[in-house]
Image (cartoon, coloured by chain):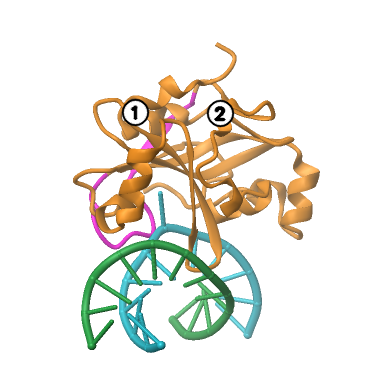
Chain colours: A orange, B cyan, C green
DNA sequence: ATGAAGATCCGG
DNA sequence: CGGATCTTCATT
């Protein structure tokens, strides 16, 4: 298997989020090792947009597994998710951190003054570094020639509570690679 | 129309 | 720690 197909995202959001750790995210000339993700469930998860936003529920209904769900947070930061559906449970995987691998020059231009290992060490940071914004919302990026995800093994995968939310803090749905320098925060 | 809240980041 | 800055949604 060269790249992940939409089939990968027809499982539970938690399975997808955990199994993405160690994979390589490729995006228009840039790439990075996926070292941190979070899972959100379309049903029964008060932290998921579908819980309080009709538009998010419509997005889940109207788009296939593997499409990008990109939204602006706090009026400042774009956050990148992948739609999960057609399996046991629908939802999203939020990309929280990458270790830069390729296109690092372009990332430095978009995030000047940061050490390389911090270029993509956060959900808003990685979209900035890769040039992802609302124009990519609902994109079928897995099928684009210069985008995709290559499978790879994670090493020492940790899990813990999701970050930055005010509800459902007990769900241990954040995943990360133990010894990565590019995590957005440490795991406890 | 208007207001509130939000899966963040940065600088003081 | 507070401010930035914008969208979605509910309420008036």
Please check the rendered image and state whether residue A79 is part of the magenta-colored stretch, yes or no. Answer: no
Label 1 sits on residue: A15
Give left or right: position of A24 versus A16: right
Along the viewing direction, whichever of A11 and A57 lies nearer the viewer: A57
The chain carrying label 2 is A
Residue drawn where x is 69% and y is 29% of the image: A146
Q: Would residue A163 be counted in the magenta stretch? A: yes
Q: What stretch is highlighted in magenta?
A: A154-171
Residue A163 rendering spot, x and y as whole percentages: 38, 54
The residue that mark 2 highlights is: A142
- The dominant secondary structure in magenta is loop
**2 or 1: tag closer to the N-terminus:** 1
Residue A180, image quadrant = top right
* Horizontal and vertical percent position of residue A68: 50, 40
On the question of residue A155 being in view, the answer is yes
- Residue at disc 1, secondary structure: helix
User: Label 1 marks which chain's residue?
Assistant: A
Q: Residue furthest left?
A: A44
Q: In this view, does A26 lie above or below A152?
A: below
On the question of residue A161 being in view, the answer is no
Q: How crowded is mark 1: few (under 14 residues within 10 Å), some or many (20 or more)?
A: some
Left or right of A65, for residue A96: right
The dot on residue A40 is: none
Residue at screen point 73% across, 48% down? A107
**From mark 2 to mark 1, how far is it between C-alphas?**
18 Å
For the point 55% across and 66% down, the residue is: A76
Q: Which of marks 2 and 1 is in front?
A: 2
Q: Tag 2: Cα neighbours inside 10 Å, few (<14), some, or many (≥20)?
A: many
């Amino acid at each position: 298997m060269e790249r992940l197909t939409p089939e990968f995202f027809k499982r539970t959001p938690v399975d997808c989020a955990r199994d993405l750790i160690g994979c390589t995210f490729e995006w228009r000339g840039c790439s990075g090792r996926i070292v941190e993700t979070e899972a959100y469930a379309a049903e029964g998860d008060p932290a998921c947009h579908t819980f309080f936003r009709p538009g998010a529920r419509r997005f889940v209904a109207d788009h296939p597994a593997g499409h990008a769900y990109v939204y602006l947070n706090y009026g400042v930061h774009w956050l990148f998710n992948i739609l999960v559906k057609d399996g046991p449970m629908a939802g999203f995987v939020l990309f929280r951190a990458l270790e830069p691998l390729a296109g690092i020059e372009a990332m430095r231009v978009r995030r000047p003054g940061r050490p390389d290992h911090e270029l993509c060490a956060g959900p808003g940071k990685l979209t900035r570094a890769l040039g992802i914004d609302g124009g990519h919302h609902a994109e079928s990026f897995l099928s684009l020639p210069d985008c995709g995800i290559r499978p790879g093994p994670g090493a020492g995968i940790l899990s813990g509570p999701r970050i930055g939310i005010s509800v459902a803090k007990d769900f241990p749905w954040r995943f990360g690679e133990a010894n990565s320098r590019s995590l957005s925060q440490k795991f406890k």
